[in-house]
Image: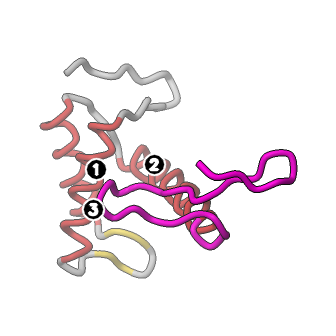
């Protein structure tokens, strides 16, 4: 896989493979109880950096992980809001949100 280029401020353009490699590491260490009240233990960041590099050929930093975690948190908040609303559910087979109905110009329609 091609290396992502960082700009002068350390920006990294994340892709699905990078997200998967990062999340694999975070889930593994979460299941081991390696998350503190204030965040991840330092060796978890090291493992995540190594895993993303090995699987994707991209060099990232702890700061890149912190920024990506903030994006994950925002996405989770949006998803939880949707799942708490009428007309939305979770499809366990496809691992994605299902939409039962949507509003179009004030009237519910089926999909």
Q: Are marks 2 and 1 in contact (CB under 8 Å)?
A: yes
Q: Are marks 1 and 3 in contact (CB under 8 Å)?
A: yes
Tell me if residue 10 comes above or below residue 73 in the rendering.
above
Which residue is outermost to the left? 54
**Which label was assigned to residue 68?**
2
Relative to 65, 8 lies left or right:
right
Q: Are marks 3 and 2 in contact (CB under 8 Å)?
A: no
Q: Position of residue 40 (x, y in %)?
A: 34, 68
Q: For the residue carrying disc 1, how many other residues have a C-alpha within 10 Å: few (<14), some (14-19), or many (20+)?
A: many
Kindly indicate the quadrant of the structure image that contains residue 100: bottom right
Q: Position of residue 67 (x, y in %)?
A: 49, 49
In magenta, the rendered stretch is 83-111
Q: Secondary structure at mark 1?
A: helix
Identify which residue is drawn at 52% across, 30% down. Answer: 9
How far is the residue under mark 1 from the one under mark 3? 6 Å
Tell me if residue 15 comes above or below residue 36 in the rendering.
above
């Amino acid at each position: 896989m091609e290396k992502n280029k960082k700009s002068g401020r350390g920006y990294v353009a994340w892709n699905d493979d990078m997200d998967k490699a990062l999340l694999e590491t975070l889930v593994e260490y979460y299941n081991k109880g390696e998350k503190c009240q204030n965040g991840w233990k330092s060796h978890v960041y090291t493992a995540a950096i190594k895993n993303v590099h090995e699987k994707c050929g991209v060099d990232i930093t702890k700061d890149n992980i912190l920024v990506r975690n903030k994006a994950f948190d925002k996405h989770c908040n949006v998803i939880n809001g949707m799942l708490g609303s009428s007309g939305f559910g979770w499809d366990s087979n496809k691992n994605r949100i299902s939409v039962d109905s949507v509003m179009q110009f004030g009237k519910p329609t089926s999909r």
